[in-house]
Image (cartoon, rainbow, N blue to C red):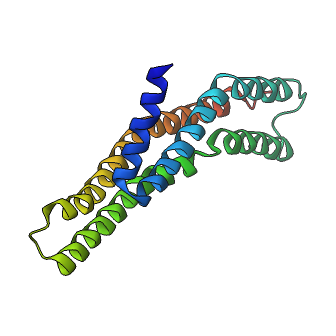
Amino acid sequence: MHWLADSFEAIRDFMELGGPVLRWIAVAIFIMWALIVERLLYFRTDMKAMSRKIHDQWESRTERRSWNAHQIRELMISRFSDATYQFISMIQTLVALCPLLGLMGTVTGMIKVFEVMATSGSGNVRAMAGGVSQATVPTMAGMVGALSGVLLVTILTRRAAREVEFLEDSLTMDH
């Protein structure tokens, strides 16, 4: 139990070291990963069920060649595509937002360094160190957050495209 308290204390110290922008980066990373986990769970459960349901509905149709049947097929594919791609653009946005928030942390940290230099001169290295840490820690956190999401959002996007294409191919127009 002591390790848990030490972990929370280390996280708290890290968050204080990075300044207020680091909290926004942490929120963005948390939301991004919550959406990634949601999509992974969706691909393992609900998507397969929805695909089977659409396929069964299509196969139960007696007529599949008319314009009306073609429009129904397109609607089914479109609904499946919407459900499959849900939240992926939000994840991509959060991946892109993380480095920008890190850059904002760099700017605010450097402003703090310049304020210290303006008030006490460049001889007060200890006071400038706080601003330097507020400049570097958010940058690092933003880059780590973005890199952690880039691979997964690429995998999710490719999987979604593959599943939609597979459904399109499986809904035949014969009969």
Residue at position x 53%, y 38% from top? 33
Where in the figure is residue 125, as x and y percent of width and height?
Answer: 13, 62
The image quarter containing residue 65 is top right
The image quarter containing residue 47 is top right
Inspect this view and state whether residue 120 appears.
yes
Residue sitting at the far bottom: 118
Judge whether 44 appears above or below 13 on screen: above
Residue at position x 21%, y 64% from top? 127
Where in the figure is residue 87, as x and y percent of width and height?
Answer: 62, 46
Quadrant where the C terminus sits is: top right
Number of numbered tags placed on the structure image:
0
Front position in the image: 58 or 68: 58
Inspect this view and state whether residue 96 appears.
no
Image side of residue 175 versus residue 138, left or right:
right
Front position in the image: 98 or 3: 3
Where in the figure is residue 119, as x and y percent of width and height?
Answer: 21, 80
Judge whether 9 appears above or below 135 on screen: above
Residue at position x 63%, y 34% from top? 38
Residue at position x 55%, y 37% from top? 36
Where in the figure is residue 169, as x and y percent of width and height?
Answer: 64, 30
Front position in the image: 162 or 116: 116
Image side of residue 69 versus residue 89, left or right:
right
Judge whether 134 appears above or below 13 on screen: below
Residue sitting at the far left: 123
Image side of residue 80 versus residue 85, left or right:
right
Image side of residue 146 versus residue 90, left or right:
left
Front position in the image: 126 or 170: 126
